[in-house]
Image: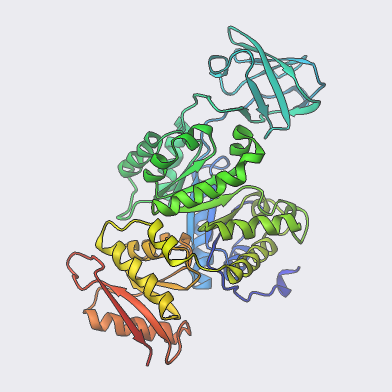
Amino acid sequence: MSKEHRDLTRISHHTKIVATIGPASSDEETLEHMIRVGLNVVRFNFSHGDAAFHGENARKVREASRRVGREVAIVADLQGPKIRVGVIEGGKMELARGDKLILDAAYEGEGKNLRVGLDYRELPKDVKAGDILLLDDGLLTLKVDKVIGEEVHTTVQNPAVLKSKKGINKQGGGLTAPALTEKDYQDLKTAVAIGADYIAVSFVKSAADMELARQLVSQAEDRGEILPGLIAKIERVEAIENLEEIILASDGVMVARGDLAVEVGNPAVPALQKRIIRTARQLRRFSITATQMMESMITNPVPTRAEVSDVANAVLDGTDAVMLSAESAAGAYPFETVRTMAQICAAAEQAQEDLPFEHTFDEIPVERIDQGIANSAVFTALLLHAKAIVALTESGTTAFQISRFGINLPIHALTPSLAVQRKMSIYRSVRPARLDTSKEHDEAIREAEEYLVQRRHLKSGDLYVITSGSMRSSGGTDELQVRRTR
């Protein structure tokens, strides 16, 4: 579809769309078009590019958002440890079943003659005879025969072509590489400096990984008043074993199905996806479902039916967001992919019945006043068939709490803070906007209603539920009203 003939009609969907920026989508016009049809969050892959590169991309995203008049969030996705083989002579090595391949941590040259070096030098210490290694996202399986010094001797289990720098996973987990490397420390500072709204930490194993990342963010020199939120990427066996503590130490989680599938096996991933999303909602955190959601659209203008079902099922699972990687970064149809994903989300949401009251409200505990207000707002809005929930919020917390119930009802979150507006872009059903909510209480509510009517989010006679804070000095949400527009 040519840019001149693109239909830029925005699709009304509650599940948010994350797209990775790359060569196919880094010009401002393409970004602008993607935002117009439903893009909510832009992912920066920190495995590529330097600080200047990411800074320029951030400028492009903000400019495209300004043109559209709709803010989006930026997620800086840290690379994490490089658990990979080294460079191979000629770029690849053909392997037959039964070949004896040596992974040599001390080898400095280009791989050849069934010997290849390692970027991850600790591998010989992490494996033993009988272990299974999966390379290149599971396309090559190796069985460890023995470990001699720095050499891991293996037997090839299936014919394959091993290319340079392909990743290594250990079946069942157990690689000791830390989640944050020296490169990640520097990239984290860059992410803060360019104004990233969230930072995703790769290969998380425990809450301690997230706590370290949070400490580093708080110490960054260029931090603003509102620090970036932290997203834990769930892609290791250890992360599943420590799931609840990791979720509690994070602002959100990403179901990173690629590496996770290699470690736990493909058949286990669908059930784990549901468990991770459900647990995140119960613990009041957001979730992103990622990896190969629309993979065929890298080269094709339409998705497969299986991909449509995959995206729809993630929506039905209750994920906050669905994510595109190579599809938007390097694919031939980045705009069409975002638009198609938005259409799938909208169709799945339309068919989705809200969770039964007793299940929803029993599932999410209430521990604070604002959580109680959020609970009551959702219950009241559903009971009275309100057209929307409106949250006057300074920090975004109340809108987030309301969104945890997974209702397919617009949550208009009005805040005076640009940074808060951007951060709320990732929450399911939340439609953030900037409005000075710090005025006298009744005036703020009146202006909020005028704003929503002027922009046709509400019309005369519509019933809506609004949350706000009467305790203006503390900024806490402690009030709920049911109103009808004039």
**Depth order, front residue of 240/218:** 240
**Depth order, front residue of 373/34:** 373
* Residue for point 57% across, 56% down: 322
- Is 264 placed left or right of 254 in the picture? right
* Residue for point 37% across, 43% down: 249
Q: Tell me: residue 210, above or below residue 280.
A: above
Answer whether residue 110 is visible to the viewer in this image: yes
* Residue for point 66% across, 52% down: 293
**Depth order, front residue of 247/197:** 247
Tell how many labels: 0
Seen as rendered, the residue at the extreme top is 148
Question: In the image, residue 108 lies at what x, y percent?
Answer: 63, 15
Answer whether residue 55 is visible to the viewer in this image: no
Question: Which image quarter holds the N terminus?
Answer: bottom right
Q: Tell me: residue 42, above or below residue 150.
A: below
**Depth order, front residue of 326/366:** 366
Question: In the image, residue 94 lies at what x, y percent?
Answer: 81, 24
Question: In the image, residue 199 lies at what x, y percent?
Answer: 45, 47
Quarter where residue 317 is shown:
bottom right
The colour scheme is rainbow
Quarter where residue 259 is shown:
top right
Question: Which image quarter holds the C terminus?
Answer: bottom left
Question: In the image, residue 440 lies at what x, y percent?
Answer: 21, 79
Q: Tell me: residue 360, above or below residue 124.
A: below
